[in-house]
């Protein structure tokens, strides 16, 4: 979906290679050995990045003269204050970053949301009912932009999945000046890390923080409103996620299709085992038994 919206193309045959290149690039950002030893994560990441640079660079000229409306084309056609095109390097860097930021985060969120609804079939039914009701009301097989807000329970559940299994669990920063926090002196230039997953389990903010309770996001409970930084899966401030509305749309569009088409279960006594870094995902790729509702 990101490729269609941002690059204006269905990746088709290339999808697997491009996908792997993104996965390798993200994994390399946390590699322990930060030197290109063949076979290790950092080396794979550099190779992935080189592939992506070639892949997108080759398209720049064609995109610049096309009538496409996607983001990549906009980057190619934009000019700076001197009326010059941005460099190929800048354009490619922006496209790679945009695709990377959109990619695993949403996948991780959908996986954990689907898992949580497998563990809590009563919520799965409630969400399905909400989707069925919307379908009855609108008769539209696809979720329309203007109907997004009508999927209220889907939205609470997405937020709860992002709280419990936050895709970006740690946000790296560097102290630009020395400061004191909770009695600790942090010198300027120290690496610091903000941890949304710590905040998301603070008992001062959340009732039963370890429980799956989507209605904590309802207007009645509104636990996320207790503090401006209580719920921060997209971070806040200058670098807050610019794709969060796109993520909501993607997840709702997916759920609207998935829940109306299938009922599903997890294996009996299923225990979720997550790979935590660089982005949480189920180690076993989340085995589900799907039952088509049309059957
Ligand atoms: C559930 C899905 C997503 C999650 C949890 C998520 C999370 C985040 C977080 C935590 C940041 C802040 C990083 C920081 O402060 O250093 C961020 C930034 C960003 N996100 Fe997302 N994101 C998601 C989806 C998306 C999507 C779909 C897009 C693209 C449409 C996107 C594009 C970006 C970009 C470009 C930034 C950098 C903003 C900046 O530095 O100014 N994200 N995201």
Image (tube, rainbow, N blue to C red):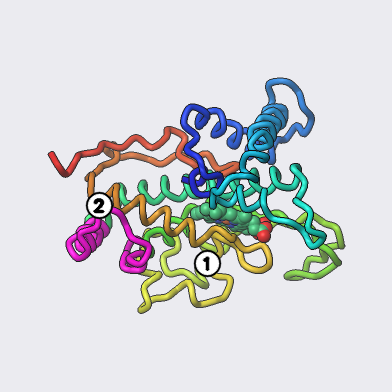
Extreme residue in the left direction: 295
Q: Can the viewer see residue 194?
A: no
Residue 143 x/y as whole percent: 32, 57
Q: Is residue 79 magenta?
A: no
Residue 76 x/y as whole percent: 67, 48
In this figure, which residue is indicated by the disc labeled 2?
A: 121
Placement of the C terminus among the 4 image quadrants:
top left
User: Relative to 133, is 82 on the left or the right?
Assistant: right
SS type, badge 1: loop
Quadrant for residue 253, please give it.
bottom left
| Residue located 48% across and 27% down the image | 13
Quadrant for residue 57, please give it.
top right
Q: Is residue 130 magenta?
A: yes
User: Relative to 294, is 242 on the left or the right?
Assistant: right
Report the magenta stretch's main SS: helix
| Residue located 55% across and 49% down the image | 67
- 113 or 148, which lies in front? 148
Which numbered marker is on residue 231? 1
| Residue located 58% across and 71% down the image | 229
Residue 242 x/y as whole percent: 59, 61
Q: Can the viewer see residue 42?
A: yes
Extreme residue in the top direction: 38
User: Relative to 223, is 122 on the left or the right?
Assistant: left
User: Relative to 101, is 117 on the left or the right?
Assistant: left
Vertical position of residue 64 compared to residue 189: above or below: above
Q: Which residues are magenta?
A: 126-154
Total numbered badges shown on the rendered structure: 2
| Residue located 27% across and 38% down the image | 268
SS type, badge 2: helix
- 247 or 224, which lies in front? 247
Residue 111 x/y as whole percent: 41, 45
């Amino acid at each position: 979906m990101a490729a269609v919206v941002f690059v204006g193309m269905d990746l088709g045959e290339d999808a697997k290679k491009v996908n792997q290149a993104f996965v390798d690039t993200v994994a390399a950002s946390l590699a322990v050995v930060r030197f290109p030893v063949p076979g290790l994560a950092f080396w794979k990441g550099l190779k992935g990045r080189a592939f992506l640079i070639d892949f997108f660079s080759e398209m720049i000229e064609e995109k610049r003269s096309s009538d496409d409306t996607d983001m990549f084309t906009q980057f190619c056609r934009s000019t700076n204050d001197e009326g010059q095109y941005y460099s190929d390097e800048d354009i490619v860097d922006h496209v790679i970053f945009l695709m990377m930021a959109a990619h695993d985060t949403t996948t991780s969120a959908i996986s954990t949301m689907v898992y949580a609804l497998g563990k809590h079939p009563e919520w799965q039914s409630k969400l399905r009912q909400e989707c069925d009701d919307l379908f009855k009301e609108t008769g539209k097989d696809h979720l329309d932009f203007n109907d997004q807000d009508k999927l209220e329970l889907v939205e609470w559940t997405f937020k709860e999945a992002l709280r419990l299994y936050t895709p970006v669990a740690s946000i790296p920063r560097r102290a630009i000046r020395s400061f004191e926090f909770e009695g600790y002196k942090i010198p300027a230039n120290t690496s610091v890390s903000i941890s949304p997953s710590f905040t998301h389990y603070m008992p001062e903010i959340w009732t039963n923080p370890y429980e799956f309770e989507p209605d904590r996001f309802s207007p009645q409970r509104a636990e996320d409103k207790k503090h401006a930084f209580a719920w921060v899966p997209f971070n806040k401030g200058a670098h807050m996620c610019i794709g969060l509305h796109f993520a909501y749309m993607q997840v709702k569009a997916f759920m609207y299709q998935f829940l109306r088409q299938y009922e599903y279960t997890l294996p009996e006594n299923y225990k979720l085992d997550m790979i935590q870094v660089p982005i949480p995902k189920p180690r076993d790729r989340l085995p589900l038994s799907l039952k088509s509702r049309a059957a």
